Every structure is written in C-alpha cells, then in structure tokens.
C-alpha cells in the first residue's frame, strides 16, 4: 500500500505553478503631450517569469522526498549472508560456514541480542532468492520470529556461566549460611567472614550499628535498631527498605527465615530486584520463508536517509524564503 504514494508525484507541479509570475506590459507612445490623443485602454499581456529558481528546486525536492518517504522505497541489494554474533568463536564459525555451503556469502557481524530483530527490520534489503545463516549464541526471543527469506540459526548452546556474588555475614552466621547454601541456579554465592571491597551484600546480624566507614551496595539487617534510617522505611513484598550513606538496607520482622518457603521467597526477591534475568540461548532452528504479505514486515532502512534529507531541505527552504523577503 505504501507504493501508492508514487501516484502523488504530479503534485510537483504545484511549486511550479506557485512560482509562475504574471507580469503586465503596457503599450505606450513617447509623445511630449498626450493631451490631444483619444482616450484608449492600455493593452496588457500575460508572460511567464521565472524567479527564485533555486528556491523552486528546493521546494520540488522537498515534496519529492516527502512522497518517497511515504512510499518507503527499498532496493534489494544483499545476497546470501552469514550473520555472525559478536564474540563467537571464529574457528567454530568457519566450520559452520563450510558445512552450510556459505563460503562465498557476505559476512555481517551484529550484536547477539539484536541480530534477529535487526534482520527482520532490514529484511527487504535482501534479494528474493537470498538465504541467511545466523551463527552464535542468540538469546531466545519471546515469540518465534518470522522471516520472508530462508534463515538458518545455529547456536553453540553453551550453558550460562554462573555469576558469583560475594556475601559477608557479620554475627550469628549459621542460619544464613544454610540458606545461601541451598541457593541453586546461575547465581552462586560466596560467603566471607568479613566485608571487603568485592562484597555486594552484608548480612548484619548484630544489635549494634556497623562502622560509619563500612560501605556495601546492599545490607540485610536482622535487627532494625542497628540502622536508624529504617524508621522511615518503605515496604515491598513484605520487606522494609531504606537508603543510607552505607548503602540500601533491607529488613523484615522474621529474619533469619525460619522455614524453606520464607528463605526461597527472600532469595527470589533478592535475585529479582538486584540482578538482571539470565538470557537463555535459542536452540538451533531453520526458519522457513513466511507466507505473510511483505507489507506486514518492517519498512526499509532508506527511510532514515530520506528523513534526514527532508530535515535538511526544509531548513534550506526556510532560510531562502526568509532571505527573499528581506
């Protein structure tokens, strides 16, 4: 449907019509006195006068760029392509390229998190008979994407490396150590006896306040009296929290957790609020060409260039118009 905007090209005649100037030419005779001549009406003629030709060209170009931007033109120029996620093992990439028969295909490096979305947004730049091979650990999308070209995704499928978190427990450590030992998943906890520069969480299990110079991103206070700032604490998911000069402080009425369910809720809340979710790698998959109409896919990248040209032409047209009036 966007291509129907090309039928608006005849509107380029409007700037030409606006720039056509009507001039009146009066026939006169050079006499010393016109007193004795009979009265006659002056003869007038309509003539074409071209004025401000540069401004006329700018306005025509501005209108043409607007029509082209609405029509969303795309020139397919890409052939068979190997899309390589950044950071992928080069030797593994070469083996996969040889196996898939893409030795002569162009290489296109892209960030792993944006590869599939970028291909879909620019897919109309590929020729109708082009094929795509995507290599690398691409994060699994929320929904199965569809492409209008054959696309094969090959991933290494390496498990996510566990993330190490340094935790320091000050005071009675037995219940807290058992809770952290039961934590499973990619988030691995290393418990230290005292806080240090790498400590991300300090479990303060003492009634007295910690030293003023001690800092940490997060504190768990078993005794709220050790942190005066908790008097104005806010609550979320049953946990009261407040920000202080030492860092953010959490507390709850029943700490340490007395049962596995309470410990699980605390760990899940901690992992959800302070750490990004782990992106799972998508499995290898061959995408057949989609039967959806091409109009339902994203537009071409030429629109970005046309939008920039529209801005520049509009600014030049306004400058010349203002200069002409002066």
Image (cartoon, rainbow, N blue to C red):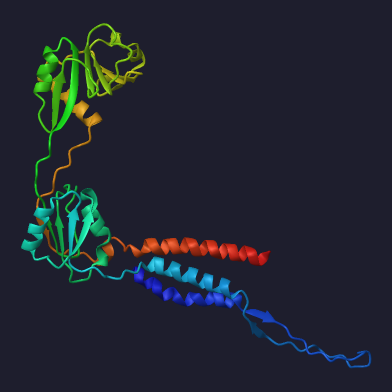
Extreme top residue here?
Answer: 208
Asked if one can make out residue 63 in the rendered structure from this viewpoint, the answer is: yes
Front residue of 190 and 49: 190
Horizontal and vertical percent position of residue 303: 37, 63
Horizontal and vertical percent position of residue 170: 20, 12
Asked where in the image residue 96 lies, by quadrant, the reply is: bottom left
> Is residue 237 placed above or below 93 in the rendered structure?
above
Q: How many marks?
A: 0
Extreme left residue here?
Answer: 99
User: Horizontal placement of 120 versus 91: left or right?
Assistant: right
User: Horizontal placement of 249 versus 52: left or right?
Assistant: left
Front residue of 89 and 240: 89
Asked where in the image residue 210 lies, by quadrant, the reply is: top left
- Where is the N terminus found, in terms of image quarters? bottom left
Q: Residue at x 18, y 24 (%)?
A: 166
Front residue of 293 and 131: 131
Horizontal and vertical percent position of residue 232: 36, 15
Asked where in the image residue 56 lies, by quadrant, the reply is: bottom right
Q: Residue at x 18, y 55 (%)?
A: 84
Asked if one can make out residue 255 in the rendered structure from this viewpoint, the answer is: no
> Is residue 218 placed above or below 253 in the rendered structure?
below
- Where is the C terminus found, in terms of image quarters? bottom right
Front residue of 101 and 24: 101
Horizontal and vertical percent position of residue 131: 16, 66
């Amino acid at each position: 449907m966007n291509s129907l905007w090309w039928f608006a090209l005849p509107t380029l005649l409007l700037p030409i019509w606006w720039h056509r100037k009507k001039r009146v030419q009066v026939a006169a005779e050079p006499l010393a006195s016109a007193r004795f001549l009979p009265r006659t009406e002056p003869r007038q003629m309509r003539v074409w006068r071209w004025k401000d030709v540069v401004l006329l060209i700018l306005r025509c170009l501005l209108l043409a760029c607007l029509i082209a931007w609405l029509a969303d033109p795309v020139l397919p120029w890409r052939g068979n392509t190997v899309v390589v996620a950044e950071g992928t093992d080069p030797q593994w990439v070469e083996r996969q390229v040889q196996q898939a028969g893409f030795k002569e295909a162009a290489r296109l490096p892209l960030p792993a998190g944006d590869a599939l979305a970028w291909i879909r947004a620019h897919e109309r730049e590929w020729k109708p008979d082009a094929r795509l091979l995507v290599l690398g650990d691409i994060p699994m999308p929320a929904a199965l994407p569809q492409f209008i070209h054959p696309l094969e995704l090959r991933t290494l499928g390496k498990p996510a490396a566990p993330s190490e978190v340094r935790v320091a427990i000050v005071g009675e450590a037995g219940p807290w150590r058992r809770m952290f030992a039961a934590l499973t998943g990619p988030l691995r906890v290393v418990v230290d006896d005292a806080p240090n520069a790498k400590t991300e969480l300090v479990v303060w299990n003492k009634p007295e306040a910690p030293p003023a110079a001690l800092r940490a991103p997060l504190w768990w206070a078993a005794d709220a009296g050790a942190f005066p700032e908790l008097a104005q604490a806010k609550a979320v998911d049953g946990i009261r929290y407040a920000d202080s000069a030492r860092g953010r402080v959490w507390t709850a009425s029943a700490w340490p957790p007395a049962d596995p369910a309470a410990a699980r809720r605390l760990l899940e809340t901690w992992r959800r609020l302070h750490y990004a979710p782990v992106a799972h790698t998508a499995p290898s998959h061959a995408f057949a060409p989609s039967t959806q109409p091409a109009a339902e896919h994203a537009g071409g990248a030429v629109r970005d260039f046309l939008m920039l040209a529209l801005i520049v032409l509009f600014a030049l047209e306004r400058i010349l118009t203002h200069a002409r009036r002066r």
